Image (spheres, helix red, strand yellow):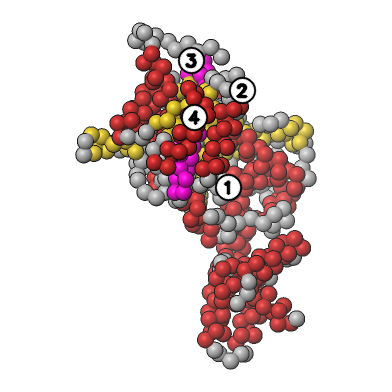
């Protein structure tokens, strides 16, 4: 029993230090399932494993007394490396706590008794464990903070926690998001943390909360008029994706200066020629910002569980670099400039399920292993085509894709579908045409056809007759399309590799090709399109 207890403690200490479970299992000769069971039981029992450093030191002391075989030497090397890593992390954690609790800053909230206590408890993990990068950010109470980050690492989650604690100190909080949908996500995180802390709201609306002390937390899609007149702390969420970042910038500066409010910008990167890019790279001019950079690799080093291989395979190189590696995008060679794309973005629009009586123009781009499949649906709204749906299926079997399309077509009887019938898509396309006849048409992706679809979609953007949600992945997909010279003319596509090929773009281009067909049927050039719903 003592041997098993010692082995279990050593294994858990190794895993806690960041060594993968597979590697520990192979080295220690223990089944991976057993290790995962130990981890689950410890979490379920609420066991305190904050003494990991002490545990590793004890294991090293025991191993040092044994005969120094090759196996023992390897274990000592692993434990020594783990101890060093944990001690560095602990040093960072202690330093960040001291920064939060002791550093005199304009926006310091620790002087407020209740807020200061909540901050201490949050940093100690009383409301749930935080990753080290989340912990470091929450610890920093500096007035100006700038974060460049990967997607899907939980930064909106910790930002909501930070804002809620500041509101307990009596500071108003305003979240400006890239879209209405993202604004509501932030408020749901605020509700989550309030539930954990036992904080009640006197006003509890979807996009506005008011505390008993009178402090307000608001979240909304970015609008430069929104900020004018607001006093308190301002958060710019996904700032790189704003349509008018400079107008927003000029609107909030007076309110920040007037009340010495805290100002935080956090975003995944986008275009190089942008205000967000300038803020990040020009440290001399924007010296007042404390900077944080967390790409997906740093997040994983700090303990984030993320299926890197699978996720990496679902994106083309440009989109992956921007979304997960914190790299800015070059605009020069793109068929769709960033300015053109943004001109058709509606921050108040988000994906929705249209009614069964709505006429829909849809497109389906087929993928199977390396690529995704994407279903896009356009609906005519106030003389403009708005992107109502964008369903993405990752590595779905053909049976799963078929069922998804059947469900869409059966519940949307006025939908028309154009489907990629190239290569692996041929069988699925033929089956859909057979089942739904005139409502479905297969499209072979020749170079000529792709050129026609790409340029037709571009014309809709140039004419301003299409609107899309502020979806960063979709925007990156559209922007990834390049015009390249081929042997017999120009080619239109994203970088060709094993990681995807702008699937959302081609689904949207297929959907938009319906519009081109309708326009060709008009008897007079420039005659308006009339559709009765």
- Residue 36 magenta-highlighted: no
Mark positioned earlier in the residue sequence (3 or 1):
1
Local packing at callout 2 (Cα closer than 10 Å; few below 14, some 14-19, many 20+) is: few
Q: Position of residue 115 (x, y in %)?
A: 71, 47
Q: Which numbered tag is attached to residue 434?
A: 4
Residue furthest out toward the bottom: 67
Camera-side mark, 2 or 4: 4
Left or right placement of residue 120 versus residue 410 in this view? right
Numbered disc in front, either 4 or 3 = 4
Classify residue 163 by image quadrant: top right
Q: How far apart in space, not on screen, are marks 3 and 1 (Cα)?
A: 38 Å
The secondary structure type at the circle numbered 4 is helix
Please tell me whether the stretch drawn in magenta is mainly helix, strand or loop: strand
Q: Secondary structure at mark 1?
A: helix
Q: Which mark is residue 155?
A: 1
Residue mark closest to the camera, 1 vs 2: 2
Q: Nearer the viewer, residue 126 or 356?
A: 356
Residue bearing the label numbered 3: 383
> Does the magenta portion include 363?
yes
For residue 355, the mark is: 2
Q: Residues within 10 Å of mark 1 (few under 14, many from 20)?
A: many
Question: For the residues carrying marks 2 and 3, which lies nearer the camera in this image?
Answer: 2
Q: Is residue 39 visible in this depiction of the protein?
A: yes
Relative to 101, is 329 above or below? above
Q: Are marks 3 and 1 in contact (CB under 8 Å)?
A: no
Q: Which residues are magenta?
A: 361-384
Comes first in the chain, label 2 or label 3: 2
Classify mark 2: helix, strand or loop: loop
Local secondary structure at mark 3? loop
């Amino acid at each position: 029993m003592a041997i098993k207890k010692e082995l279990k403690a050593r294994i858990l200490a190794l895993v806690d230090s960041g060594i993968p479970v597979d590697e520990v299992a192979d080295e220690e000769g223990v089944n991976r399932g057993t290790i995962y069971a130990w981890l689950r039981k410890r979490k379920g029992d609420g066991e305190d494993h904050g003494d990991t450093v002490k545990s590793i030191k004890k294991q090293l002391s025991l191993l040092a007394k044994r005969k120094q075989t090759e196996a023992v030497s390897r274990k000592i090397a692993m434990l020594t490396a783990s101890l060093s890593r944990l001690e560095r992390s602990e040093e960072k954690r202690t330093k960040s706590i001291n920064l939060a609790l002791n550093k005199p800053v304009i926006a310091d909230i620790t002087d407020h008794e209740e807020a200061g206590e909540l901050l201490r408890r949050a940093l100690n993990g009383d409301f749930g464990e935080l990753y080290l990068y989340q912990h470091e950010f929450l610890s920093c109470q500096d007035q100006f903070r700038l974060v460049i980050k990967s997607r899907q690492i939980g930064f909106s989650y910790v930002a909501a926690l930070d804002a809620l604690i500041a509101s307990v100190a009596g500071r108003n909080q305003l979240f400006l998001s890239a879209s209405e949908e993202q604004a509501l996500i932030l408020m749901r995180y605020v509700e989550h943390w309030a539930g954990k802390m036992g904080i009640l709201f006197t006003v509890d609306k979807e996009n506005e909360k008011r505390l008993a002390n009178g402090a307000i937390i608001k979240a909304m899609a970015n609008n430069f008029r929104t900020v004018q007149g607001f006093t308190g702390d301002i958060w710019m969420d996904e700032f790189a994706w704003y349509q008018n970042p400079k107008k927003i910038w000029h609107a909030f500066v007076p309110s920040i200066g007037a009340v010495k409010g805290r100002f935080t910008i956090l975003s995944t990167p986008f275009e190089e020629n942008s205000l967000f890019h300038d803020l990040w790279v020009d440290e001399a001019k924007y010296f007042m910002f404390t900077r944080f950079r967390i790409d997906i690799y740093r997040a994983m080093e700090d303990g984030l569980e993320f299926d890197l291989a699978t996720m990496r395979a679902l994106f083309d190189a440009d989109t992956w670099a921007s979304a997960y590696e914190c790299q800015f995008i070059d605009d020069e060679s793109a068929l769709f400039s960033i300015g053109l794309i943004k001109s058709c973005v509606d921050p108040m629009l988000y994906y929705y399920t249209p009614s069964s009586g709505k006429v829909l123009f849809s497109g389906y781009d087929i993928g199977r292993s390396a690529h995704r499949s994407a279903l896009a649906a356009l609906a005519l709204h106030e003389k403009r085509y708005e992107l109502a749906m964008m369903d993405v299926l990752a590595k779905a079997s053909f049976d799963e894709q078929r069922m998804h399309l059947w469900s869409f077509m059966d519940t949307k009887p006025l939908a028309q579908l154009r489907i990629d019938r190239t290569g692996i898509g041929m069988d699925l396309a033929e089956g859909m045409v057979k089942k739904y006849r005139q409502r479905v048409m297969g499209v072979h992706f020749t170079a000529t056809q792709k050129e026609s679809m790409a340029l037709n979609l571009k014309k809709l953007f140039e004419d301003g007759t299409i609107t899309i949600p502020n979806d960063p992945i979709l925007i990156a997909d559209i922007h990834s399309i390049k015009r390249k010279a081929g042997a017999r003319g120009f080619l239109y596509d994203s970088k060709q590799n094993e990681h995807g090929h702008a699937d959302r773009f081609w689904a949207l281009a297929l959907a938009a090709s319906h519009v081109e067909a309708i326009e060709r049927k008009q008897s007079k050039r420039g005659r308006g399109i009339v559709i009765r719903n």
